[in-house]
Image (spheres, helix red, strand yellow):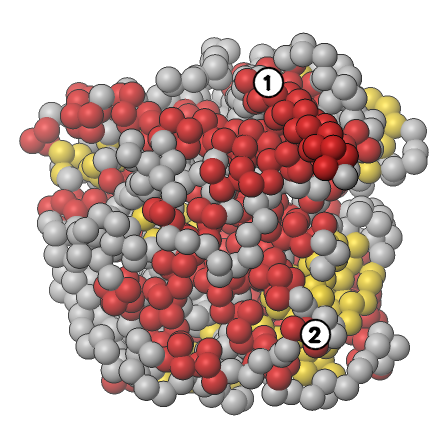
Amino acid sequence: MNLDSKIPSGPIEDKWTRHQFESKLVNPANRRKFEVIVVGTGLAGASASAALAELGYRVKTLCTHDSPRRAHSIAAQGGINASKNYQNDGDSVYRLFYDTIKGGDFRAREANVHRLAENSVKIIDHCAALGVPFAREYGGTLANRSFGGAQVSRTFYARGQTGQQLLLGAYSSMMRQVDAGRVNLLPRREMLELVVIDGKARGVIARNIETGEFETHVADAVVLCTGGYGNVFYLSTNAKNCNVTAAWRCYVKGAGFGNPCFTQIHPTCIPQSGDHQSKLTLMSESLRNDGRVWVPKARGDKRPPHQIPLEERDYYLERIYPSFGNLAPRDIASRAAKLQCDDGRGVGETGLAVYLDFADAIKRDSASTIAQRYGNLFQMYDKITGEDPYKTPMRIYPAVHYTMGGLWVDYNLMSTIPGLHVLGEANFSDHGANRLGASALMQGLSDGYFIIPTTIGNYFGSTSLPKVDSSHDAFKQALDDAKSRTQKMLAVKGSQTVDDIHRRIGKIMWDNCGMARNEDSLTRALAEIPKVRESFWSDVRVPGEGVALNQELEKAGRVADFIDLAELMCRDALERKESCGGHFRTEYQTEDNEALRDDANFCHAAVWEFAGTGKAVRNTEPLAFENVKLATRSYK
Amino acid sequence: MTASNATATGHKKNSRFKLHLKIWRQKGKNEAGGLVDYDVNDVNPDMSFLEMIDVLNQDLIKKGEEPVAFDHDCREGICGSCAMVINGNAHGPDTGTTTCQLHMRRFNDGETVVVEPFRAKAFPVLKDLVVDRSAFDRITAAGGYVSVNTGSAPDANAIPISKTIADVAMDAAACIGCGACVAACRNGSAMLFVSAKVSQLSLLPQGKAEREERVSRMVWQMDEEDFGSCTNMGSCAGACPKEISLEHIARLNREYLRATVLKKDRQASDSGNG
């Protein structure tokens, strides 16, 4: 597998500028000759569709939702980072770059992360120009808040709905191009196969979710913006329809899969309330600006929170990480919560929760000020739990939230299959082993608005792409594959529902490949997963028919791919014999329970190559740290 | 401030209760549909309404029947996918709440609950509770944007916007495009939806350059899509899960009138000059 990262030479701050200059261009009149398929309409997909169409490329955009505005970026709450230094608190492109590399526990590419930090500034400008109603100060300038893993205030926000507002901005730009006839928008389509001709990505097979009919779509390049795979755990903060299928089909067709085991467990989610639970709900990290995390000092203390006096509480994040306090990065805050609960100090009925308490902030700033900052989040918490966070502390517990791993891409955001570009959460590129808060929105928009418009031109300008159409054998083959897979699932007519099997694989993953992993648990999971696969293909029950709207059939296809992905994640976690960021191997930890990296042997991205169902080959891309010195991450 | 209208009906924690459902079932777009009776015997008060439907669906699949189709995704009240009329109310009995955020503690043991799709001429039913809301996308495509190309923006702080204006714009921008306003309106009007976008962009300086064109085109597109007229009943705002205010409809009307007057002025001066 060729893993040439194509990082430009020269000093880090010049690499992107130089690369933009050295990239091949397509002249404006020729751009309309190229057709690009964009799959997905979250921040990455909507912004890429808009930006490519603005340049004059013909764009065809597919999304599974009934409207592109509903992609899961919409649910991001807290904010988006940008090194504007509007607060005069010492921020800079270099500091955002540094924080992100360190936050990712030194497992991301320096060059990509620096480019991300550079672009962050332009993102805010562009989004403001699009009419995104960012929070403002009374003087009319933009407001900022703080997020985990940073000591500066660089997070821009729109109440607790930043993802929604940024997505609606990108969606509106894309709809403007739909109106101009440059984007052909196809909602309720699910990509089920990638078509590769002469080694290059030349189209996709999609299923029309509304009618159940299969479609072939031919193009000169494919841009995959299909998000993360956290739903492999069944319970996660992802939307119910988030899935790995499009990315997994590309992996099966030869695209390398980078660091599949790097999963982010978010520290502040509403705890599970019962077996009926269908998903978990995040409470934005921004709440940790004002909320204080604590547990009772005594094990098994079942008193209601207000009866526990101050001296009997342990504000453990403030105690262990005095310089970052409640704003310690996500992996660290999550693990700390788990340690408290495992140690018997958890609160609530199940003991699997810690308090996030706003009493001090309300006393200091008044309830109405707190309501202005987090009103919608408090309301959401109240609706879900039936408890009022203005009066009683929130109960929170970590939950699967984001996947840093994804399809491997080079500096041009191109996968190991030429012509297949991967943007946003679907790629593996910028967050290393742990993503900092408010960086996902930044990456999605950086990839879509500012990177792909340059790099796709470079691809078209340097590649010969003979004309193909859907009568090509590769299209027929891919279409047959997609159809027969669907038929096979419908034909099993077994006894277990798709959800039964999804819950089972999810539990195996959470118990064995979740917040903590070790050789025993991973080996156990690797023995269990093939049995789940076997029971899926021999005993799943998918009701209804294929050529119709059939939501169980959609779910079945996704769960089948999750099972195979689960196996790859466990294998990756087993092979990475170190702890870093969200990947915590219990065998590799310091005396005070912090992650213990092994830079001598694992300072690389692990990139997996498909070698048949249940089989994969591990390749590596070494990571060089020329600017930020490899060091033990400390937030104390 | 707490906005807690999820009034407890006295269910005990971890208790279970029974519900009788009447759900709209319809096989396909051009087929007749009807209400079908179902019993769910194992409702947990902490479940969301959609989780209760999940339980029913699992049961139906195990019995060899087809589950109830319904749109849903984030289940956090922000994506705007879920769309059920519950006992005659779009998104159910609570104000400011999407179907996915409605919890079963709101219902009583033994209660009969009628579940139907969002109904409007412009929202044809595709299957069971799934409707086609693509008309909203076409309205947005007609002008719900600021025409600025990527890469050409000035520094974000170059244009100060007063906090008051930014806050009202944000109130309008909170619309999730679910269509409850249309479902709640006796005329099937989309005025609240259209007004939210028009209001947001006409308030902000960035959106002012094309405000006349925007409002005219969006209103024309709304009429094209078979939405009904607005008669100021206000049911839309009552059903809106994001509590978008009627003041935005007032602003839309002003913007539309303004655009029309300006257009007439321009035509007059054009013909005068010609």
Label 2: chain letter: A
Which of these two is toward me, B159 or B89?
B159
Q: Percent position (x, y) of residue B36?
A: 82, 24
Q: Are marks 2 and 1 on the same chain?
A: no
Q: Report the residue at 49% width, 65% height from top.
A: A450
Q: Percent position (x, y) of residue B189?
A: 73, 22
Q: Percent position (x, y) of residue B253?
A: 64, 21
For residue A561, what is the image quadrant?
bottom right
For residue A261, what is the image quadrant?
bottom left
Q: Report the residue at 28% width, 34% height from top.
A: A139
Q: Residue at label 1? A: B250
Which of these two is toward me, B206 or B118?
B206
Residue occupying the far left of the picture: A311
Q: For numbered disc 1, what is the local secondary structure?
A: helix
For residue A531, what is the image quadrant?
bottom right
Q: Residue A29 got which mark?
A: 2
